[in-house]
Image (cartoon, rainbow, N blue to C red):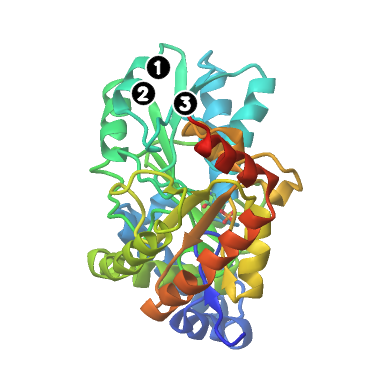
């Protein structure tokens, strides 16, 4: 095997060279503590300020509305639990979300359910898109928060966030969005889009792992996440992860510099990939064809299992991902695919290929070459597939 194709950019991305170069001096030269008063500390402090400015600019926010976290999961937890603590104490104990959130959101609201919060899980329909009118209909006097992800990490569908934001604002309900997959792919302006809280992560946009940020609208004071020093305005204490913060700043600046231009190039690859893969009999694309992230292609192949498919793809130099919850070691089909109404047996045979800045048309051609024979091989061994073919031949 000579070719290696990385097609799992929704799981994580390669750190860009510019990001690495920007980070390096903060390990070995400017390693001062940003809280120290001497020169080297102040250099580090200035670098953190500069990165905060870059993150704020990418979102249309102010610098003092950006709080660095250890990643997307932490930002999600902080936003949701923070609002719940603050408004739950005033008797507002109802949260609205969707059935296909990332687990960082889903498991957080489930934990709150155990504490007496009530959660409405909105449908996402067959195309994987939430209807804004469903959000409006679900809002109650005791609703404290609407949390809906900007773009789904498995099927790539982009949600009507500006409309949902407007509905929340008109109803006086706080609105959080997990925008980890969307930042750098979709134009975001937190003010125009009426977003109160937004989560993002470095490693999904060619920045380092273990760094992210929470945007929290001015005037909305959430309970502190970590008590200690005065870092992050005293709301999340602990000496700053300076190199990673610097890396996140550069990464988000690069990702947001020319969103239409960059995404158009990636979308060309995605469209070519989708066209090729759908030539495989009994295959389908999951999620809306148009309203999706530029790099996301998520397929189901009847009669096979996602895990075996991934292994054989790996042998053939392709890194992809399955919708199944393989991380938990369970063979449960993806909650996202079930939420868009796929039956269990079909949801098992899913494959997510997510393309990014470093992919080429050569990569697409390689996948188009190796994937069909792998699917065929697995079907030849599959009792499920025999069943499907038998039923097809049966006269009605
Ligand atoms: C990756 C991801 C997260 C988690 O971000 P981490 O930085 O890995 O904690 C949260 N939400 C979505 C939609 C993601 O894709």
Q: Closer to the camera: disc 2 or disc 3? A: 3
Say above or below: 117 vs 59.
Answer: above
Of all residues, the one furthest to the right in this rendering is: 329
x and y, in percent, of residue 22 in the image: 48, 82
The residue indicated by pointer 1 is: 138
Cα gap from disc 2 to disc 3, whole angstroms: 42 Å
Q: Is residue 345 visible?
A: yes
Q: Secondary structure at mark 2?
A: helix
Q: Quadrant of the N terminus?
A: bottom right
Judge by depth and name the residue closer to the eye, 127 or 233. Answer: 127
Cα gap from disc 1 to disc 2, whole angstroms: 5 Å
Q: Closer to the camera: disc 1 or disc 3? A: 3
Q: Is residue 8 visible?
A: no
Q: Are marks 1 and 2 in contact (CB under 8 Å)?
A: yes
The quarter of the picture where residue 205 lies is bottom left
Residue located at (69% from left, 21% from top): 114
x and y, in percent, of residue 118 in the image: 57, 17
Residue located at (40% from left, 70% from top): 50
Judge by depth and name the residue closer to the eye, 387 or 338. Answer: 387
The residue indicated by pointer 2 is: 135
The residue indicated by pointer 3 is: 396
Pointer 2 residue Cβ closer than 8 Å to ligand 1: no
Q: Secondary structure at mark 1?
A: helix
């Amino acid at each position: 095997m000579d070719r290696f194709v990385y097609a799992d950019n929704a799981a994580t991305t390669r750190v860009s060279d510019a990001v690495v170069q920007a980070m390096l001096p903060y390990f070995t030269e400017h390693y001062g503590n940003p809280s120290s008063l001497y020169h080297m500390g102040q250099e580090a402090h200035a670098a953190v300020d500069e990165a905060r400015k870059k993150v704020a600019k990418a979102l249309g926010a102010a610098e003092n509305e950006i709080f660095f976290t250890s990643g997307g999961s932490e930002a999600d937890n902080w936003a949701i639990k923070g609002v719940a603590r603050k408004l739950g104490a005033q008797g507002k104990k109802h949260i609205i979300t969707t059935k296909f959130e990332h687990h960082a959101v889903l498991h957080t609201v489930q934990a709150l359910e155990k504490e007496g919060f009530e959660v409405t899980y909105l449908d996402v329909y067959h195309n994987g898109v939430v209807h804004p009118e469903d959000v409006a209909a679900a809002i109650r006097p005791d609703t404290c928060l609407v949390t809906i992800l900007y773009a789904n990490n498995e099927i790539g569908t982009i949600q009507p966030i500006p409309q949902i934001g407007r509905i929340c604002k008109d109803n006086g309900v706080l609105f959080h969005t997990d925008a980890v997959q969307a930042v750098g792919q979709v134009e975001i302006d937190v003010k125009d889009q009426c977003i109160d809280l937004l989560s993002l992560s470095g490693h999904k946009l060619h920045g380092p792992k273990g760094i992210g940020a929470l945007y929290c609208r001015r005037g909305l004071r959430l309970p502190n996440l970590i008590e200690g020093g005065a870092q992050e305005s005293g709301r999340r204490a602990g000496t700053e992860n300076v190199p990673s913060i610097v890396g996140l700043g550069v990464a988000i600046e690069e990702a947001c510099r020319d969103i239409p231009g960059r995404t158009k190039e990636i979308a060309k690859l995605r469209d070519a990939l989708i066209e090729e893969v759908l030539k495989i009999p009994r295959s389908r694309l999951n999620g809306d064809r148009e309203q999706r992230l530029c790099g996301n292609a998520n397929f189901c192949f009847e009669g096979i299992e996602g895990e075996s498919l991934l292994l054989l793809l790996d042998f053939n130099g392709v890194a992809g991902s399955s919708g199944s919850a393989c991380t938990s070691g369970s063979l449960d089909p993806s909650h996202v695919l079930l939420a868009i109404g796929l039956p269990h047996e079909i949801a098992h045979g899913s494959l997510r290929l997510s393309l990014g800045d470093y992919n080429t048309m050569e990569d697409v051609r390689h996948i188009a070459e190796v994937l069909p024979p792998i699917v065929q091989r697995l079907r030849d061994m599959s009792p499920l597939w025999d069943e499907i073919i038998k039923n097809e031949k049966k006269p009605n």
